Image: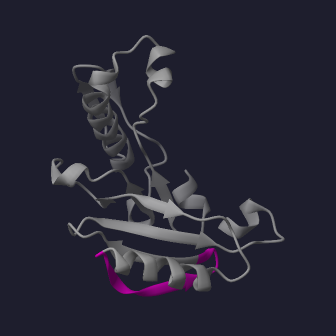
Amino acid sequence: MLSHFCKGDLHLAFGRGTAKIEYDAYDIDMSSAKERFKEAIEIINHGLSGEPFEFEGQFYKVGRRVAVRPKPNRSKIHFYRPNENHEWKRKGNSTSLCFQRDPCKDPSKIIESWTSEILKIGGSAKGIPKLANFGSEQWMLDPEKNQFLILVPYLSSTSDMEALI
């Protein structure tokens, strides 16, 4: 629904967690985390398509045909998840991780400094930094050519909701 309310794009980032205490709290064997995460991402991708789907995996089941309503505006949704050395086949506009710094008054200066540090360790920039109403962002490639986003929002006197629309 947010993809219809916001004037800008919607950025969603997911990670599976690596703290054993998180898995112990639900009595889940941590060795299954990677496969559980893959299934969860598959379900989320189905849901974001807006098309009816069912799912039955090793860990999760959507036992009846369902669809997200209203149908998400997928062209405005950017979906980030760990690359895991390309072991997953990319679907939709699913990309890789997003790293965010604390908001500041001059986000482009932080992006410039951060980019410089990434270049020093063998990364590369994809295009030029983008300055938008939310802040500044730069797409990067790590030394193995895995794509990721760095993002620094503006320090705003308005509410987060006002900054989104």
Residue at 73% over, 61% down? 160
Of the 4 image quadrants, the one containing the C terminus is bottom right
Residue 126 located within the stretch drawn in magenta: yes
Residue at 59% over, 79% down? 110
Overall secondary structure of the magenta section? strand
Give percent across and percent down for residue 36. 30, 28
**Is residue 11 depicted above or below 52 in this figure?**
below
Q: Residue furthest bottom?
A: 128
- Locate residue 146: give its quadrant: bottom left
- Segment tinted magenta in the rendering: 122-135
Who is closer to the viewer here, 36 or 145? 145
- Locate residue 60: give its quadrant: top left
Give percent across and percent down for residue 154. 69, 74
Q: Residue furthest front?
A: 120
Q: Residue furthest right?
A: 157
**Is residue 149 depicted above or below 69 in this figure?**
below
- Locate residue 52: give its quadrant: top left
Residue 115 located within the stretch drawn in magenta: no
Give the left or right position of residue 33, taking residue 1 as reference. left
In this orientation, does residue 68 appear?
yes
Who is closer to the viewer here, 150 or 159? 150
Residue at 30% over, 61% down? 93
In this orientation, does residue 8 appear?
no
Q: How is the image coloured?
A: one colour
Give percent across and percent down for residue 1. 55, 50
> How many dots with numbers?
0
Give percent across and percent down for residue 7. 59, 71
